[in-house]
Structure formats: structure tokens, C-alpha cells
Image (cartoon, helix red, strand yellow):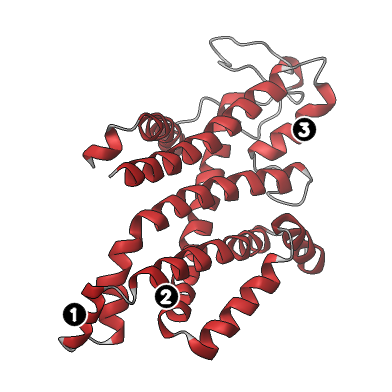
Amino acid sequence: MKKYFQNKSFCIGLSLVCFFLALMLVGFFYLPCDPTATDANVKFASMSRSHILGTDHLGRDVLSRLMVGTRISFGIGFVVMFFGGLAGLFLGLISGYMGGWLDLIVQKIIAVQMTFPGILLALMLIAVFGTDTKITLLALCLMSLPRFTRITRSGVLKCKNALFIKSARARGAGHFRIMFVHILPNILPELLVTCSLSFALAILSESALSYLGLGIQPPTPSFGRMLNDAQRFIFTDPKGVIIPAVFLSALVSAFNLLGDGISEAEGSA
């Protein structure tokens, strides 16, 4: 870990991720106000002790909504990274190691999926199955699948004919052991970078869908939903747009910096 902590991008990204994690964890135990409670008497309230980041057009506390929105973003990012990464890892290992017709079929399927832009694929699924959080998660997982598959396959192709793999095979190691014990640890840095970038892209894509009214549905707050609600009042209450946009940009940048830091540290090793 020493080479990671010597990298500036990694340290900045990790610090930002820790900040948002702390914000999310505090939100599980304490929220300044009910994030869905409206109060016409305090709408567009400025920053104060009772409302640290002010209120929106319905009098809802902005800080409380951001804390819940951070929880939503982390939850969606983790689910997409875990299930998309797991499926992509399996497909990439199998297709890269086995090769032949199996590799050809997997690569053709991935190539066909990659012809559809991720957001377009998500919009198509939502149009067919309706606006539901499960459908949004499925669409985002499918979006992340090609990236993990291609990165894993590329790493396997670089390693599978290496001397240490031939040595393991000569000692009688089976296919499963070679893939998961000998090859997988050697492509772990590339996978960590992909996980970080996929996490950021999942958060950004969910926010885009919520902004369009096709992702997280009200009254549940999310960054995209908050931006959609506030855009009509951008001249009346600019902080309603600026604050969620800054939080969303910082959260996405945190994971991008984390991935860049890992890539730079491994490149200089």
C-alpha cells in the first residue's frame, strides 16, 4: 500500500471517498431533518443553524436530502460494481483462458452490447419494463459488464502463456486453480481501476436517469432528482442547483482519482 499512499491522486480520491462514506454512515443514525418533510414557511431558506445548507422550493432540508442521496449513490454504485464486476470477471476469465469458439461467442455478444450506448440501453429497458429501481440497477449492471469482461480477458491473454503459468500447469494445477490462484492476483490492479471507474460511472448514470425522471422516483432524494427539482428555480435559488452539482462532481471525481492513483502507482512500480 505504500506506493499508493505516495501517489497524490490516490490520496485525494481516498480522502474524498472517506468524507462521503462518513456522511453516508452518519445519515444512517442521524439526519438534521426529515428529508421528505415539506414546509411552505421555510422554502428557499438560506443557510442557518436549523438548516445548514438551506431548504429547497418545498421547504425540505437540503443537507438531509444530500445525506440520503449519498446513501443511494453508494448503494447503486456498489451493486453495479459487484454484480457487473462478478459477471464480467467470470466471462473474461473463461473466454480468455479457454479461447476457441467459447471466446468467439462471448466476444461477439460483448461487441453487440457495446454498439448500444449505455444510457440508450438503460432507456430502452425502462421503456419496456417501466421506471423501477430494480430495472435501473439491471440496466446499469449490463452497462458495466463489457468493461469488466474486456479488461479481464486482456489480462488473462497476457498471463496465460507466461512461464509461471506453464510451471503451474506442469506441476498438475487444474484450470480452476490456474485461473483464480495464479492469473487473477496478477490482473488485480487493472480490475481495481475498473471497479473504481465503474463505480463513478454508475453514480453518474443513475443521476442522469433520475434527472430525466427515469431513475430513483420521488419522494426518495437523489442527486439527479434534486437537480431536476431545482433547475426551474436556478435564478431564484441558485444554491439549489450548485450544492447538489458540487456534491455529485466531488463524489464522481473521488472515484476517478482513486482509479487514476492506482493506475499511476502500478505504472511506476
**Residue 235 at x, y = what percent?**
82, 15
Name the residue rendered at 37%, 44% in the picture.
Answer: 262
Q: Is residue 83 left or right of residue 51?
A: left
**Residue 138 at x, y = what percent?**
62, 65
Q: Is residue 94 left or right of residue 222?
A: left
Mark 1: secondary structure:
helix
Residue under numbered circle 3: 229
Name the residue rendered at 78%, 47% in the picture.
Answer: 213
Q: Amino acid at mark 2?
A: Leu
Q: Which mark is residue 93?
A: 2
Does 178 sit above or below residue 203? Answer: below
Q: Nearer the viewer, residue 58 or 255?
A: 255
Name the residue rendered at 47%, 54% in the picture.
Answer: 194
Does 49 sit above or below residue 189? Answer: above
Residue under numbered circle 1: 167
Q: Is residue 145 left or right of residue 98?
A: right
Asked if residue 14 can be seen in this view, the reply is yes
Q: Which is more foreground, mark 2 or mark 1?
A: 1
Q: Amino acid at mark 1?
A: Ser
Number of other residues with Cα within 10 Å of mark 2, as a class: few under 14, some 14 to 19, many 20 or more: many
The answer to whether the residue labelled 2 contacts the one labelled 1, judged by CB atoms less than 8 Å apart, is no
Q: Nearer the viewer, residue 176 or 211?
A: 176
Mark 2: secondary structure:
helix
Q: Which of the 4 image quarters holds residue 20?
A: top left
**Residue 44 at x, y = what percent?**
73, 16
Q: How many marks?
A: 3
